[in-house]
């Protein structure tokens, strides 16, 4: 079988007391208070996926995660074919052909065939692959390696950032410049700081002022701002003399604002707050013309993602010293509440789903605000490539967008069912 390793990693196969695998689905359930109801939810079949994934997942891609107390872990592909036998005490996700595992209480890296890898070296920090290269750090020095771990650019920098559009910010002698993928200086190190603000512009600071250069080092935006945020929808916020302004990619100021605490533009909206940091300052949203589109009525207002924004409301008659919010929820770009603003916590939408928390348990809703994966988990991560890592009791594993656990053994489900039943009947 051809293994394509990307984005995710391997699906974990868990064996404990028996080799049979139990694949489970779940459907939307009302809020239940009992552990018995929670446990029953796991065995219910799903009807339809919450939303189609925007990209097709190749069934030969290896995905997954495993960390099971008292059980051995292995790996399988998305079709259930065993790739590596369950021999590991612990197994981490595969990334770019490498995974960290524990065997005989020794932690090491393996490839997709289970072969021990000598890379990364001991005490070497490794970042994710981006644009063909990854940052590697050892003894406080930064460099770059390729997918296989071969060092392409020596670890000779004080700091370094990921490559974008063929160049990367690197620091030496206390100054930042731009290097190419051969480690040659495209822009000599002469700036006090820098960060990418879109695919072709890099914000740089000199003598206390920010401007922007292109990947060849030409100054595109003059050094006249106190700060410049990343560009979204072709515009960015900049601060000049304690005033927030909206600029284009050539530095033209197209709008001045009386607000502070302005977020980035997403879906044509940016969060705003009045000047001042008072505990009860209210927040809302503006369009690119600076017009208030969604009133300033929220305690917190986060950036839009997938046409939805996470907001937090004040509780009536809240006073200093008490918990002053009624909860969190979601609105659309017109300010319509998609969910009640009553969840204990929530994450922004990703791949059409958002994690929400109520009664100390997590689940997922779709863009219409409907619960599509029941709130039964102790913790969850956002969906990535069609999968989410969740914790349930002492178990940590992946679920798909149907809420189906991946690699959940019959033994594990029986043990967990008994444990929760015992807790419920205490």
Image (tube, rainbow, N blue to C red):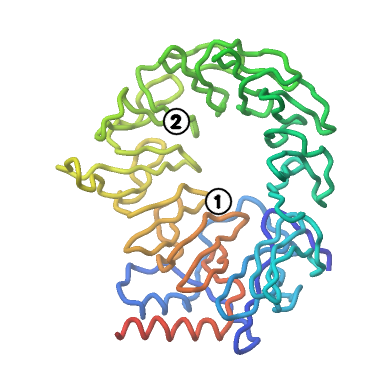
Residue at image point 30% right, 51% down: 340
Instruction: Tell which of 73 and 293 is nearer to you.
Output: 73
SS label for mark 2: loop
Mark 1 vs 2, N-terminal side = 2
Q: Is residue 46 above or below residue 119?
A: below
Measure the C-alpha gap from mark 1 to mark 2.
22 Å
Residue closest to the far left: 317
Residue closest to the far front: 139
Q: Quadrant of the C terminus?
A: bottom left
Checking the image for residue 420, the label placed there is: none
SS label for mark 1: loop
Residue at image point 23% right, 48% down: 323
Checking the image for residue 263, the label placed there is: 2
Image coords of residue 310 (percent x, y): 40, 44
Image coords of residue 91 (percent x, y): 66, 68
Q: Quadrant of the N terminus?
A: bottom right
Image coords of residue 373 (percent x, y): 46, 64
Instruction: Tell which of 363 and 192 is nearer to you.
Output: 192
**Residue carrying label 1:** 351
Q: Is residue 329 left or right of residue 326?
A: right
Residue at image point 28% right, 32% down: 282
Q: Residues within 10 Å of mark 2 (few under 14, many from 20)?
A: many
């Amino acid at each position: 079988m051809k293994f394509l390793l990307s984005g995710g990693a391997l699906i974990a196969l868990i064996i404990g007391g028996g080799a049979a695998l139990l694949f489970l689905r779940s459907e939307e359930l009302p809020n239940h208070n009992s552990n018995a109801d929670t446990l029953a939810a796991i065995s219910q079949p799903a009807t339809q996926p919450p939303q189609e994934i925007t990209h097709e997942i190749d069934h030969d891609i290896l995905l997954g995660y495993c960390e099971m107390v008292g059980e051995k872990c292995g790996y399988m592909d998305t079709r259930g074919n065993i790739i590596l036998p369950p021999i590991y005490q612990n197994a981490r996700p595969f990334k770019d052909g490498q995974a960290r595992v524990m065997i005989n209480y020794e932690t090491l890296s393996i490839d997709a065939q289970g072969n021990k890898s000598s890379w990364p070296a001991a005490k070497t920090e490794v970042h994710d692959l981006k644009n063909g290269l990854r940052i590697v750090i050892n003894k406080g020095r930064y460099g770059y390696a390729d997918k296989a771990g071969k060092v392409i650019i020596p670890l000779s920098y004080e700091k370094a950032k990921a490559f974008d559009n063929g160049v990367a910010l690197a620091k030496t002698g206390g100054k930042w410049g731009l290097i190419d993928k051969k480690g040659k200086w495209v822009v000599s190190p002469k700036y006090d700081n820098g960060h990418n603000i879109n695919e072709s512009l890099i914000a740089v600071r000199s003598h206390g002022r920010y401007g922007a250069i292109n990947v060849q080092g030409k100054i595109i935006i003059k050094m006249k701002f106190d700060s410049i945020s990343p560009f979204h929808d072709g515009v960015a916020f900049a601060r000049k003399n304690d005033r927030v302004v909206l600029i284009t990619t050539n530095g033209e100021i197209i709008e001045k604002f009386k607000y502070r605490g302005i977020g980035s533009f997403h879906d044509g909206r940016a969060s705003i707050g009045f000047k001042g940091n008072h505990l009860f300052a209210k927040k809302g949203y503006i369009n690119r013309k600076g017009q208030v589109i969604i009133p300033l009525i929220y305690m917190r207002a986060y950036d839009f993602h997938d046409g939805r924004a996470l907001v937090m409301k004040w509780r009536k008659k809240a006073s200093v010293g008490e918990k002053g919010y009624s909860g969190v929820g979601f609105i659309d770009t017109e300010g319509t509440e998609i969910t009640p603003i009553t969840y204990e916590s929530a994450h922004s939408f990703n791949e059409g789903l958002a994690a929400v928390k109520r009664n100390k348990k997590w689940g997922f809703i779709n863009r219409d605000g409907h619960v599509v994966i029941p709130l039964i988990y102790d913790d969850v991560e956002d969906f990535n490539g069609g999968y989410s890592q969740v914790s349930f009791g002492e178990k940590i594993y992946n679920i798909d967008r149907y809420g189906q656990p991946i690699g959940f053994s019959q033994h594990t489900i029986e043990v967990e069912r008994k444990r929760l039943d015992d807790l419920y009947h205490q």
